[in-house]
Image (cartoon, grey):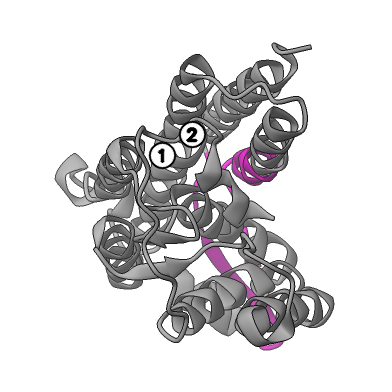
Amino acid sequence: MKQVPNFFTLLNLVFGCLAIVCVLQTGENIIALSDESATGTIVNFPEKIWWGSLFLFAAAVVDFLDGFLARLLKAQSGMGEQLDSLSDMVSFGVAPGMILYQLLRMAYAQNENGLEVSWAALLPAFVFTIAVAWRLAKFNISTTQKYSFEGVPSPAGGLLVASLPLVLWYDQDWNIARFLLNPWVLYALIALVAYLMVSRHSMMALKFRDYSLRNNGLKYALVAAGIVLIILLGWLSVPAIFLLYVVLSFFVKEPAVSAVSPKTDREETDITV
């Protein structure tokens, strides 16, 4: 039974690998936008990029379950911690970086000779991946991130990126597509999220010392607002919830908790609740 959490951790890794496979299956057509009429725009994707996004959301689900089961079965271990970080690096670091790479290709494809864009213009996509690596390494050696995080957790950043193809696919609003498939918007998004992940800003963790409204009001507000946003906005709710999470985190004051040894209960995954 003590290996059950590790099974879910490795399933997270498998989903991350499948996401990368889907994102790389570009086919020949990567034209991003095509005006059909005065009423709207069609978004043409590389074949499987939005399937890759769905695999990353599946990875987030099992990423939460491995930590939950580890605590339930009292199966926390150093081995599990290392497997968790390595799996998260693939699912929430490498795979989202590939999504950003493809989105940048599609953004440039709108321009004349856009398919011949230099690889140097696409390389900033992996600044996100580098930031995730830094974030995970910092988390692994930290002994104080018990009820709050230092910087945005990597699963939150990864899911934000994973939501972008789904927003474009299911919410084909002309303005949203034109806005998101702009290289400078994508560069700004990469820089902002990378900064938030490696920063020293205290971010809310959905972990509770108690369940009182007084001590957890903003956390309950985030959960309630998230449910409403999902109902109203669909996949567009993911960026909205991410933004709300960051804003509310600046109002949550959690005292640092010291520990004798590094964590082995996969605490970072709790943000994906």
* Left or right, residue 14 beside residue 102: right
Residue numbers of the magenta segment = 29-57
The reply to whether residue 36 is in sight is yes
Secondary structure beneath disc 1? helix
**Residue occupied by mark 2:** 88
Residue 113 falls left or right of residue 29: left
Find numbered disc 2 in the image and state the secondary structure of the residue it sits on: helix
**In this view, which residue lies farthest toward the front?**
260
Residue at 64% of width from left, 17% of height from top?
6
Distance between the Cα atoms at labels 2 and 1?
Answer: 7 Å
What is the crowding at mark 2: few (fewer than 14 residues within 10 Å), some, or many (at least 20)? many
| 90 drawn magenta | no
Residue 181 showing in the rendered view:
no
Q: Residue at x 47, y 71 (%)?
A: 180
Image quadrant assignment for residue 1: top right
Residue 151 locus on image (x, y percent): 34, 61
What is the number of the mark on residue 93?
A: 1
Side of 204 relative to 201 (left or right): right
